[in-house]
Amino acid sequence: MALYLFRFLFIIFVLLHVQIVRAQVTYSLSHAVSDAISLSADVTAARSLYMQSEEGINQARSYNLPQVTGSSEFGEGEDESEGRQNVNQDGKRYTLSFQLDQNIWSFGRIDARLDAARAGTRVANYQLKAAIGEVAQQVSLAYASFIFRSELVELREDYVDNISAQLKSIERHLVAGTAKRTDVSRVRSQYFQARNDLGLAEARSRSASGTLQRLTGQDLLSGGLVVSRDGLEELLNYVPETFAIALEQVLQSSPVILEAIEELSRVKANARFSEAELYPSIGLRGLASRSKTGDFDSDSTTIGLTGSFSLFDGGLRRSQLRQSRESINSATNLVRSSRDQSSIRVEQIWENLEGHRSGRGDIEDAVSEVSKSVSDAQREVSAGSLSIVALTQSEKDLLDVQILLAENNLQYIQSVIALMREIGILTQLDNL
């Protein structure tokens, strides 16, 4: 009997241990971003376009390689010529031939095709990075929001506990005749308001968790996962020291700007191809064939240079060249525009970041000062020199500045996330 009881208790212990370990599993920001990337339809589509663009390079390379084709014919044949010289050329007929074509000189057509394909692959790569950055930003913001909402719940839970204790204390004073009913009503009203605010905070926390679950597919509330500030703190290591450094990093590594630059390279390569189309192309062709009709056999082999050129196309090639040159102007302006817009966004983000960073110190000082006031008020209440109503007001003041500090921290990290998106750090977030 004792053995069975021991086994039962051991199984209960193991199950409880598993639940405790499960509850302590940290769901990092990089893991959340990785999960969201794997679920994102936009990232999947961008990755597919990138793989398609890589095949464009293989297609462009193929123009430098020999092209071998073969053909065959089989059927009935009849020769009605008068000079057959007793050779039967009527009856079954077959023909088999092979042709090899090798480009020798294309006046830059093939090189232009290859350069355009490579630039197109780089464009697709930066489009993929932009899609990943968008997902990473959404997840990072949702992750930070969930942490902030969870902190608000904890702050309001502590405040409800404090107000509840003060309410019980002042009710005891009311029974003893040492407190006014109006003071009890005021504390009770604060308690109910605190409970209501706590309910709203919990609802917003669930909503933030739902947003994160929609992006990552992970249920934080019932999945035994715990978020951590470590990933958000890691982002702070990438914040540049000055605005000038931040702007330089954006101009050098922003996926949006780099995509525009590579698009300009692709357009220039297409323009070179259009220009090369005005010139002939030279190649080498070899042809071998064998045919038989009845009793007559025929073999032939030829090899020689080939050239192709346009005599008249109605102005098509000239029009295509002018069009490609105008595309260069458009792509050049797009590069300038992307740089200007990125610079404006970074300037605005940096102003917000500096504002929240400079204001944090003042708020932290206010939290420290109000915390001391609450401690003093608690001692005075214990000594009977201060009313419980005044203490609850001090605790409400402390809650207000704590919430203000949490909001400032959230807005600061939101600015950091936006800056990391511009720089391109978020595209690597799943590997940080």
Image: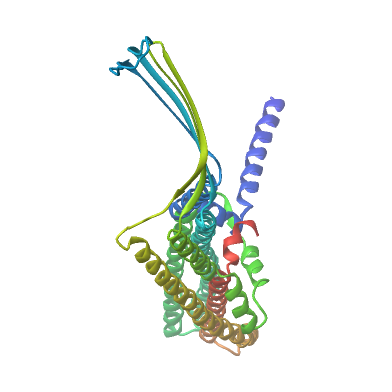
Q: Position of residue 62 (x, y in %)?
A: 53, 44
- Relative to 157, does residue 6 appear above or below in the rendering? above
Q: Residue at x 71, y 26 (%)?
A: 3
Task: Tell me, yes or no, if residue 374 can be seen here.
Answer: no
Across and down, in percent, residue 11 comes to 65, 34
* Residue found at the far left of this picture: 80
- In the rendered view of the protein, which quadrant contains the C terminus? bottom right
Residue at 58% over, 74% down? 250
Residue 113 position, x and y percent, is: 50, 55
Q: In front: 168, or 29?
A: 29
Residue sitting at 57 percent across and 50 percent down? 224
Dividing the picture into quarters, in which one does residue 26 lie? bottom right
Which one is nearer the viewer's eye here, 232 or 422?
422
Quadrant the N terminus occupies: top right
Above or below, 34 against 291 in this view is below
Q: Is residue 233 left or right of residue 99?
A: right
Residue 183 visible in the shown view: yes
Residue in front for this viewpoint, 359 or 202? 359
Foreground residue among 367 and 108 = 108
Q: In the rendered view, would you say 237 is above or below 136?
A: below
Tag count: 0
Q: How is the image coloured?
A: rainbow
Left or right of residue 12, residue 117 in this image: left
